[in-house]
Every structure is written in C-alpha cells, then in structure tokens.
Amino acid sequence: MKIAILPGDGIGPEIVAQAVKVLNALDEPFELETAPVGGAGYEASGHPLPEATLALAQAADAVLFGAVGDWKYDTLDRPLRPEQAILGLRKNLGLFANLRPAILYPELAGASTLKPEVVSGLDILIIRELTGDIYFGQPRGVRECPDGPFKGQREGFDTMRYAEGEIRRIAHVAFQAAQKRDKRLTSVDKANVLETFQFWKDIVTDVHKEYPDVALDHMYVDNAAMQLVRAPKKFDVIVTGNMFGDILSDAAAMLTGSIGMLPSASLDANNKGLYEPSHGSAPDIAGKGVANPLATILSAAMMLRYSLGRAEQADRIENAVKAVLAQGLRTPDIYEDGTRKIGTEQMGDAVVAALA
Amino acid sequence: MKIAILPGDGIGPEIVAQAVKVLNALDEPFELETAPVGGAGYEASGHPLPEATLALAQAADAVLFGAVGDWKYDTLDRPLRPEQAILGLRKNLGLFANLRPAILYPELAGASTLKPEVVSGLDILIIRELTGDIYFGQPRGVRECPDGPFKGQREGFDTMRYAEGEIRRIAHVAFQAAQKRDKRLTSVDKANVLETFQFWKDIVTDVHKEYPDVALDHMYVDNAAMQLVRAPKKFDVIVTGNMFGDILSDAAAMLTGSIGMLPSASLDANNKGLYEPSHGSAPDIAGKGVANPLATILSAAMMLRYSLGRAEQADRIENAVKAVLAQGLRTPDIYEDGTRKIGTEQMGDAVVAALA
Ligand SMILES: CC(C)[C@H](C(=O)O)[C@@H](O)C(=O)O
Ligand SMILES: CC(C)[C@H](C(=O)O)[C@@H](O)C(=O)O
C-alpha cells in the first residue's frame, strides 16, 4: 500500500517526521513517498500544488498531510498561495467528507478555557462537507454591481450552492457515523435565511428515513455556535456544510484547549482519504523542535482505520498516545505543572516506545 | 419624539412592558405607539410584518423591538414566518449597522461556562453588517444544477455579495466606534477563500487610511471563532459581514453566560435605529413572568443614546441596572446561591426604583 507524505510548511515537516517514524515502527508493508506542497511546492516548482505532487496523491491509497502556509507567501496572488494546495487536493481527490473529532483527554482537561464540568469527557464528531458550498460555487469574482442602491459600483460576489446528491452523500456518511456512536445527529443549517440550507434541511430529513435508529435534530448555525459554548457535551455527531463546518469545527476544537491533539480525516466516496492535524503550520515555532506531533500521529491512526483497513494498528497508536499522556510527557503547548516538558522528536520517540 | 414599540411573540410582550415602564419613568416627552409583529403580526393581519407596523416603524424616530418566533409558526411558508419580520424591518429601514456589545457584569461572572480568568472584565463590541451579504443577495432559490458532476439534479443556491459602498459605510461605523473605545479593530473575513471577503478586506484596509489612530488587524472567521473561545478579552471591536456576524455575535454573547443581559442596536445612516435584546422569544417560558427584562431595558438605554440624543438618560438606566445587580436581585436565568430570585415585573420595578 502506498502512502503519499506531504509535509508542507512551517512545523509540517517536523510533525510529519514523527508520524512517519510511528508508521515505520508498525512493521507493515507500506510504501511511503514524499512530495512538496504549499509554500514548499511553490518554492520547488512555482505552484502550491505541483503536478507531480497531485499525481502522487492521486496514485496513493492515502495521503498524510502536515500543514501549509507562512506569512512570507501572503503577498502572492491568491492562486499561488499555500492554502490553494489544500483546496486543490480536496477538489481533485473528491474528498467530500471531513471528519473532525473534538475529544478532551482527561489528562489535559486543565488546558481548556472552559470550566471542567462543561468539557470533561467531551467527545463530539463534526462532519463537514468539503467539496461544495460557497468554497467552490461559480460564478464568483469582482464585478460591477448590477442593481440596487449600489448599482454601478464594484462588488465582490460568490455563489453558495449544494446539489441534492452532494447533500445525500454527506448525510449518509453522517448517519452511518452516528450509528457507530451515540446515534444522535445534529444537522446545522441556516434554513430560516438561506435557500441552500432550506434545501439541505429537506434532503437530510429525507435521508433520515433510511436511518430510523438515529435521532436527528436540526439547529441554526448561530444557535449551534452558542450551544458549543454553553453545553458542548450535548452533541454527539454534527453534520454541516463547508463554510459553517469551517467555523464550527475550529470552535469545537478550541473548546478542548489542546488543538495540538486533534486529528482529521477527509474522505472520498471509496474511503480513500487525506489525513492532517486540525491545527495550522505555526510558522512562528517552526524548526524549534517544540511543536506537538500528536495530532499528526493520531491522523496517521485515522488513516490506518479508514483508508488502510488496519483498525488494530490504529488502536495501537491511539493507546500509545494515551500511554505517553499518562506517563506525564507533554510538549510545551499542553505542558502544566507536575508534567514533564519534552520536544517534538522526543514525543515521537515516546509514542514509538509505547507501541511495544 | 415618537418610539414604535413592537413587542412580538413569546416573552416579547412581557419584557418590552418592563422597558416601557422604565421609559415612562424618565419623564421625557416620548410618544410611544405599539404594533404587532412576527407571529403576532401574522395573527393580526396575515403577515409577520403588517403594512401598518412597517409604516409606524418608518415614521418613528426609533423602534423598540421585543422578539419574534414560536414553534407554532414553523409550518408556515417561509415568507410568512415570524423571522421574516425582522429581515423586512432591517431592509426597509436601511438598518445596516448592528452593534452588539458582549459585556460580562462582574456580579454575573459565575454564569459563564468559561473560566473566570478568561472572561472576567470582558467588554467587546461586535459590529455586524446587517442589510447585505448572502442574506439578501440575488439570485437565490432551487434550480436545476447547471454543471459539474451533479448536473441536472436539483440544487439550492444563494448569492453572497458586498458592494464597495456597503463595506465602506460599515467600516466607518466600526472605526468610529473603535475610536471611542480602545482604538483596536479586528475585521473578520474569509479572504483566503471568498472573493466577497477579499474585496471586503481590501476596502476596509483602504478606509483605515482615514483612521490612523485605530489599530486594524484582519482575521479569518474560523480563527476568530477560535480566538473568541481561547482569549476573548484580546478583542476590542470586531467588524464583519452579515453571515459571519450572525454566528460570531451569538458565540460572543454566550461567552458571558448571561445572554439575558445583552442589548443590541441596528442603525441606519442617520442613527435612527431598531433596538432589541440579543436573545430570542423563548416561547417555552412565555407568560410565566420569569423572563429577564434587562436586555430589553438596556436596549432602551442604547436607543436613548444612539437615536434620541439622551445620553444622560441612557447612563441613568445603565447605572440603575448595575444597582439592581449590586442589590442581589436576579431573574431565574442569572440566579445563583446568595442572591434573591425575582420575576420579570419585579425586575422592571426594581430598575424604575433604582433610577431615582
Ligand atoms: C486554509 C483554508 C482554505 C481551510 C478552509 O477554510 O477550509 C482551513 O481553514 C481548513 O479548515 O482546512
Ligand atoms: C431570525 C434570524 C433571521 C436572525 C438572523 O439570522 O439575522 C437572527 O438570528 C438574528 O441574529 O437576529
């Protein structure tokens, strides 16, 4: 089985190196091939998603992705900026289902800005549609305002849209995920204002007929943002569109206070996927050996489970991560009094040691 | 001076009654006229925003609004649902600037789900554009998908758009608000994905030239949602579009844990405005005399300050609210051990008494 390794920018290379170390320690016949992406892709060949990198990702059985972005690319034209690589990979690989668990590890409860009783034991799964919505809808651009009081001025515009089949397939993913958990699904929309999301709500309601064992409720996105702050443990699985999911999944991740721990999976229709930490490229700490590699290592575990059919190996890694936390080992982002502060490489080594 | 009083549905009438009591106690020559809106408007004349109600609001110097919505209207066609009244009022009155303070009263610090050190002293102002964006953009609807892999299926779609003049005027409001506070403005966008918000960012950056005394920074909406949870006190004033503002202002309100305390103002170009509590119509507790009227009373104070040129009276009301909190008086939503639980009417009476 072939895994494309795309380390990217900032802390990407150093955290991905730890996940690779863990993968190699599993003694599986995986073939790992590395390619540049993001700013590194731009440096290597003038484009954030070089053709060879895309070809490698397409040919592989799964992609392990680090992070992209650095302030030094902020002045590039938008199509050349690092984040276009991740949008291009999602679209070209058809990765429509983004799974983002927000889990609070008991050992790290203190890291949350929320009161312990509000977040202890938090375990929610946000499922974000990833290849539709206003992210990719056409037409879009800057044009002359065609009507209304600002007619004739310049205006920026974008198109939000969801086709029936796009909503159906993400709804199926969400209902099936809920079936494996607490069987409760919250579909987040803005049906009181948006045609797209009234349509979304209608289709999700229709798909629900096939999953009578799952309890479905609908919530407006503004209310969902409030409930995530007020009582996040009331959620089990949340499903929503690309734009709302971008906002809510980051908010949910931050509830845990330890975004350095949270993996993500982006899957296509055949469970091929791209796996990446939920956090960004953190250029400010790149190269210092202090970044937390656990979100990337846990992303590798998700890859083993969802794309490579190696659930036991995924369990091994997840248990190894729990073991190093129980040993009191912490990178600086999750350090607190009474624990032992270690660096990126040491954390990778500790997970490898705990695999045994 | 004429004030239109639109109580609306659910707890709307009972909380607005308390604010009216407070306004009457000021001994100002205000003329108050009441009209039905929302579900009440639909009951009275078949439309959530009856013509006479709109005419009254247009003729008035300011509008005091309660809340709209009740589950019993959920099955109506969308144009007849209560929330259409608020969208119609915003659009018809040109109320493009929504000001939503998120303030944590020291006495209520315990109500927040966040740790006291994260939120104590919180005082941020969210300025949400209210008449543009994807809320009103045309075209929108359900159509046959014109292209791509889902071609021929039904799709829901909406148009996000912002004209230059729309962005300029809300930016001016935001910079001027920041000048009266800590002189820091965060413009929230999604310029890395949306053409509308790259344009937004460019225009806000341009308007900044006229306000060199204000420090401006730009933040992506997903990051803003995270920073509101992580370190909300770092913000001073936030300005953003209608859709992102809907989500972020509710999240920010919930950080305080006492959304029953938070007022809002929606202003036109001449400081005429509509004033309403940040919370909803809470039909589950309507008529029980337990709703917190303070957000509505504080909305009346904002009305006095922004639309009626009565800043001293606004101060009087705000000080009276602080006084009743200091006296330990609490409606059930903000009650905790050691304070005195009272009802809606008693709270209104207590504020009137504290005005003296
Ligand atoms: C970098 C950006 C385009 C991206 C997104 O908005 O999807 C990021 O925020 C994410 O969530 O992966
Ligand atoms: C009721 C709804 C249309 C409205 C909005 O989305 O603007 C509400 O959520 C608000 O924020 O006032």
Image: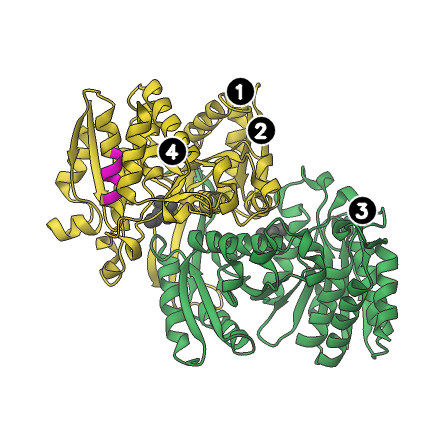
Chain colours: A green, B yellow
Distance between the alpha carbons at the discs numbered 1 and 2: 9 Å
Q: What residue is rendered at 61% in x and 69% in y? A: A267
Instruction: Magenta stretch: give its range.
Output: B14-19
Residue B50 is situated, as x and y percent measured from the top left of the image, at 15, 44
Q: Residues within 10 Å of mark 2 (few under 14, many from 20)?
A: some
Closest to the camera, between mark 3 and mark 4, is 4
Q: Nearer the viewer, residue A60 or A314?
A: A314
The reply to the same-chain question for discs 4 and 1 is yes
Q: State the mark number for residue B211.
A: 1
- Helix, strand, or loop for circle 4? helix
Are the residues flagged by discs 1 and 2 in contact, CB closer than 8 Å? yes
User: Per the image, is B242 magenta?
Assistant: no
Residue B180 is situated, as x and y percent measured from the top left of the image, at 48, 21
- Helix, strand, or loop for circle 3? loop
Q: State the mark number for residue B216.
A: 2
Q: Residue furthest front?
A: B338
Which badge, 4 or 1, comes first in the chain's sequence? 1
The reply to the same-chain question for discs 3 and 2 is no
Look at the numbered disc 4 and say if its residue's Cβ is closer than 8 Å to ligand 2. no
On-image quarter of the N terminus of chain B: top left
Are the residues flagged by discs 1 and 3 in contact, CB closer than 8 Å? no
Q: Chain of mark 2?
A: B
Specify the amino acid type for callout 1: Tyr
Specify the amino acid type for callout 4: Val
- Relative to A217, B238 lies left or right: right
